[in-house]
Image (spheres, rainbow, N blue to C red):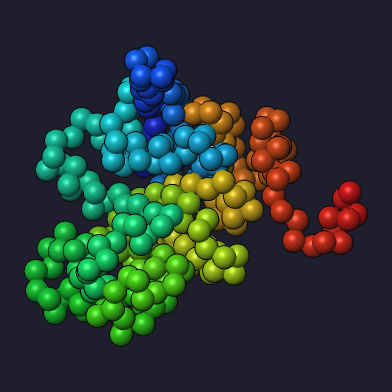
Amino acid sequence: MAQAMIEVEHLSKHFARKSGMWGDSSAVVKAVDDISFHIAPGEVLGLVGESGSGKSTTGRLILRLIEPTQGRVLHEGKNVFDLNGSQMRELRKQMQIVFQDPYGAFNPRMTVGAILGEALQLRGLSTRGARDSEARKFLEMVQMPNSILGRYPHEFSGGQRQRIGIARALAVEPKFIVADEPVSALDVSTQAEIVNLLLDLQQRLNLTMLFISHDLSVVKVLCDRVAVMQNGKLVEVGTSEQIYNSPQQQYTRDLLAAIPIPDPMRAKRAA
């Protein structure tokens, strides 16, 4: 069997939370609690669960945006927590994130061209002309016109900003992407457009992806396997077919039962 691109081994992240009237005592919150899983090259793994289950914390740990309490994350066999600063800067070219709200991750005083240019500089494109030429390529890839290079983030809709966020993530030509609730802030029709775009890009570029979501109807379209989190723990992992057709855990069955039924007549028949 080929080596996994990402291996998560006994990963935990605990936070101390002050309690009491004067904040004089503390409780430990186990946001991520001893989880292990892998992601194969070219695979899309869906990480699902309710809000507060530890999904986003897991994504940030994998990218080493936060440090773990214990455990390892291996990227192509190397533990990311053992890497020094320069090694991590190199690795970040291969591992990128798409946020739920890209606007919060953009500098509002920077144009789209400058936002993409920052990422392209990491690839060694030193001239403005070279960066603009490459930026146009990535805008086309996410179905945005290259005429927007001189515009600012506030001038775009949420869906358009998400496309720009995806373009920025792709601009460093990563192998692995964490997509952290990338469609949850969008309306239903725009969600479908972004999911179809991600599916197309993943297949075209052979990306490996961790797709974090609380919406199992979205995950079903995009993901090869699904991992279910509850209270910081992994409670079930399986192929999409296994999870959707024969879930083993009651929690997973409850999540599936909460998926909205779009056909009102179907809902009446199910009642």
74 or 129: nearer the viewer:
129
| Residue 54 pos. (x, y %) | 47, 34
Answer left or right for 89 relative to 11: left
Seen as rendered, the residue at the extreme left is 126
Answer left or right for 66 relative to 163: left
x 52%, y 63%: residue: 186
Q: Is residue 139 visible?
A: yes
8 or 187: nearer the viewer:
187
Quadrant of the frame with the N terminus = top left
Seen as rendered, the residue at the extreme front is 21
Answer left or right for 225 relative to 85: right
157 or 212: nearer the viewer:
157
Q: Is residue 196 visible?
A: no
| Residue 138 pos. (x, y %) | 32, 72
Name the image quarter holding residue 110.
bottom left
7 lies above or below 180: above
x 43%, y 50%: residue: 180
How many tags in the picture?
0
Seen as rendered, the residue at the extreme top is 25
| Residue 67 pos. (x, y %) | 28, 31
Name the image quarter holding residue 4.
top left
201 lies above or below 82: below
Answer left or right for 241 relative to 131: right
x 44%, y 24%: residue: 30
13 lies above or below 107: above
x 43%, y 54%: residue: 100
